[in-house]
Amino acid sequence: MGKIGKPAPVKLVIGFIYKEELPLKKSSDILKRYFGEVDFKSQALEFNLTSYYKEEMGQGLKRKFISFKKLILPQSLPKIKIISNKIETKFSIDKRRVINIDPGYLDLAKLILATTKDYCHRIYINNGIYAEVTLTYQGKSFRPWDWTYPDYRTQEYIGIFNNIREIYSKQIQCTPHI
């Protein structure tokens, strides 16, 4: 029988899909008040591998990722997803989002994303929120699964998560468990 233990702290990662900079800045500022200092910020990337958000948010969408210096416990992900949904609603215009906020976390082995949508590869975690292992770390890099979103499969995104993983790896070497 395995010994029950406490989970290790993980790295909070937030992905944004947006068109205009102002909702991105305001959303980021709110998240910083909740979760503290940002220690990684990606460049703005074109979001063009799916038309899923086109009707709601328009064309010319961009994606940006940030991660936070303060580590979190994995079980806080549902609360964080609920916060991100409230922020999306706050900035919505005529019930249409102008920003999409995708929280998740990264540890040495995987990238987990939170979602409100169930599917065969997602696990219910709490409060109407599901978790998905979107990428797994093998052979010195993150790797996609069959269900991984097209943009998360790109070398550009994988490079971002490898960079964040390196930051996290250095952090946990000198950080006691929460």
Image (cartoon, rainbow, N blue to C red):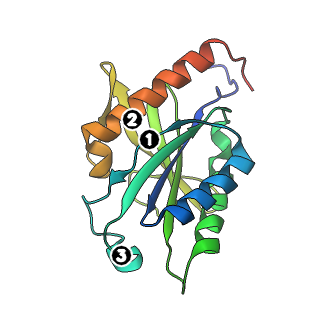
Closer to us: mark 2 or mark 1? 1
Q: Does dot 3 land on a helix, a strand or a loop?
A: loop
**Mark linked to residue 58:** 3
Q: Position of residue 61 (x, y in %)?
A: 35, 64
Residue 123 appears in the picture as rendered: no
Residue labelled with disc 2: 160
Please identify the residue farthest to the bottom as the structure is shown: 94
Q: Is residue 72 above or below residue 16?
A: above
**Residue 8 location in percent, x, y?**
64, 26
| Disc 2 to disc 1, C-alpha distance | 7 Å
Quadrant including the N terminus: top right
Which amino acid type is marked by label 1?
A: Ser
Left or right, residue 118 beside residue 151: right
* Residue occupying the point 52% across, 24% down: 167
Question: Circles 2 and 1: CB distance less than 8 Å?
Answer: yes
Q: Residues within 10 Å of mark 3 (few under 14, many from 20)?
A: few
Q: Which residue is mark 1?
A: 42
